[in-house]
Amino acid sequence: MARRVLVDDIPERLSEDDFWGLFGRVEHQTLDFKRGVPEDILKTIPAMAMTDGGLIVHGVSPDLTITGCPLSQNTLDRIMRFANECDVEVRVRSVLVGESEITVTEVPEIRGRVVTTPDGRLLRRVGGDSQPLRGDAFARFVRQREDRSGEDEPVGGFRLADVDLSVLNGVLEADERPSVEQEGTLRALVDLGVALPGAHPSDASVLRAAAVLFVDYPGKYVRGASVQLVRREGVGPGPGPTSARTECSGPLSRIVDDCLRFISRHTKQYAVVRGVKRETLPEYPESVLREAILNALAHRDYGLVGTTVDVTVWDDRIEVRSPGSLPGHITTANMREEHYSRNRRIMRVLKMAGLVEEYGEGVDRMYREMEARLMEPPIFFSSESSVTVTLRNRFLVDVEDQVWLSLLGQYPMTVGERRALVVARRERFVTPRRLRQVLGDSDVGGLLSGAVAKGLLVRVGERGGSRYELSDEIVLRAGSGGMEAQSRKGQLLYDAIQQRGSISTSEGTALLGENASTVRGLLNGLVGMGLARAEGRTRGRRYHKA
């Protein structure tokens, strides 16, 4: 993943292709294009300062044409006047793109104080927009912003030998930077923003963020920087008997993997057939568990030393508790759409490493993944001292139906549409009356009409006698209730190819007791799915391992 562009990263001269390759063509949280120096940068500057900082590129029109904006005295004076009105120190430089000179303004991230527009509005960057905060969200953001994050605290007596170089170099390589040996560790930590430079390179101050991310035993420097994992019998109330307990410590990314292994050992694993492959389906979606644990570690309050992230596995649920209240303006009501990082340094490194994608998308992804398997959505609870997410293992449909739905991939569907498809698959069709029995007082008519419009179902019959069946596209993607026998036969052929190395149509006919046409169709189906490859002409054709 390429790192965020800073003003010092930009060459003095660029071709237009190189310019777009460096910046991309989409404005986002840390990038804004302007034709010139309009007054609305009085919003952009404070919004960037209150989010992650960023670049304002002057000389690009709304239709993404490079029109140029030379760094004249008038341009510089205008930028500096607007920046001074917002009380933000910016850096300005010129860049030649093709034959056009443009101007780039770098806005720093400001912490420890609040920056507003000249008329007193507090703005934050959301995508490519600058949006205001109001009411309680405003007040809580101000309190959080004025406090120093625990990740920013220097650690005393830090030993560079405690850094796991394999983890550090993994991040550097993911960010397209050269790997380092131990003597280059301190400089690398400074470059990643988890150590502060001093007067001399050896005087750099290592922060708690570095210990959390890269040290084999971070508790040596940040007491409580670990995860307590417990398997309790029953569902409560009360603590319940403990059948397993352990503590995970180490670099943050390794802790996540260790936690997932513990959970896997103490939750159910279903043996299923997906298409023609035998697989194991975990009780809880691994991507959801990973996101829950990663969020707990990345967003916890590292100023609350001595407290750990706690993961408790019950018979009916998993609870992940993180020390510290929700940060900034985030509430349980807006957390799917908004984001605010208490630990900016940690989050930046995780994004460099590819462990998180876009800020703020993780929670929404958890909801979508649970919906895809027709499980209850995550439940978030926040108090003044902690945030807990609860994942329940209650399914609206059985495991076989979940596997069938998974064959549809990321097909855009609501929970109601998924349940309608399951009924249509199991019962060959679904009627409005039957769907009301399943969903209760829902807008069944609107749901079915929407499913038809999306190509999920087809309507058969008119008025009161109408019913809805799986569309051809859905059957093509995932099969239907009548195709399980075919899938089992395909599995037998697939297994034979894996064991023997290859198989012919006649050998498949002897194996299944089916006619040659049926067997040939099944074998060609394996080829179409990339599970086998065919060699030879029709009569001498053999099907080999893919």
Image: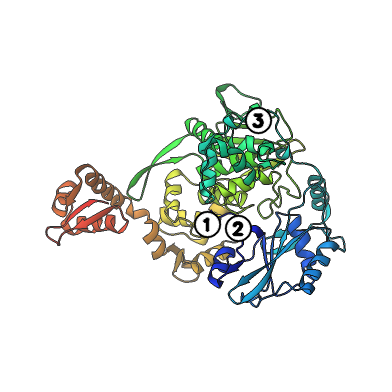
Residue indicated by mark 1: 435
Image position, residue 263 (x, y; %): 52, 33
Q: Locate residue 36 relative to residue 442 in the image: left or right.
A: right
Q: Which residue in the rendered view is the most extreme toward the right?
A: 119
Residue 175, image x, y percentages: 54, 50
Report which quarter residue 391 is drawn in: top right
Are the residues at dot 2 and dot 1 in contact (C-beta closer than 8 Å)? yes
Give the residue displayed 75% in from the left and 38% down from the top: 383
| Distance of label 3 from label 2 (alpha carbons) | 60 Å
Dot 3 falls on a residue whose secondary structure is: loop
Q: Does residue 151 appear left or right of residue 501 in this picture?
A: right
Q: Amino acid at mark 2?
A: Ser
Name the residue at the left extreme.
539
Whichever of callouts 3 and 2 sits on the residue coming sooner in the sequence is: 3
Assess whether mark 2 and mark 3 are in contact (beta carbons under 8 angstroms): no
Residue topped by disc 2: 442
Q: CA distance from mark 2 to mark 1?
A: 9 Å
Asked whether, in this view, residue 396 is left or right of residue 191, the answer is left
Figure label count: 3
Residue 283 visible in rendering: yes
Disc 2 on helix, strand or loop? loop
Name the residue rendered at 37%, 61% in the picture: 476
Mark 3 vs 1, N-terminal side: 3
* Residue position marked by numbered label 3 in the rendering: 158
Task: Please provide percent x and percent y for residue 270.
Answer: 42, 38
Viewer-proximal residue among 465 and 177: 177
Name which residue type carries label 1.
Leu
In the picture provided, is 107 more to the left or to the right than 217?
right
Q: Position of residue 543 (x, y in %)?
A: 20, 53
Number of other residues with Cα within 10 Å of mark 3, as a class: few under 14, some 14 to 19, many 20 or more: some
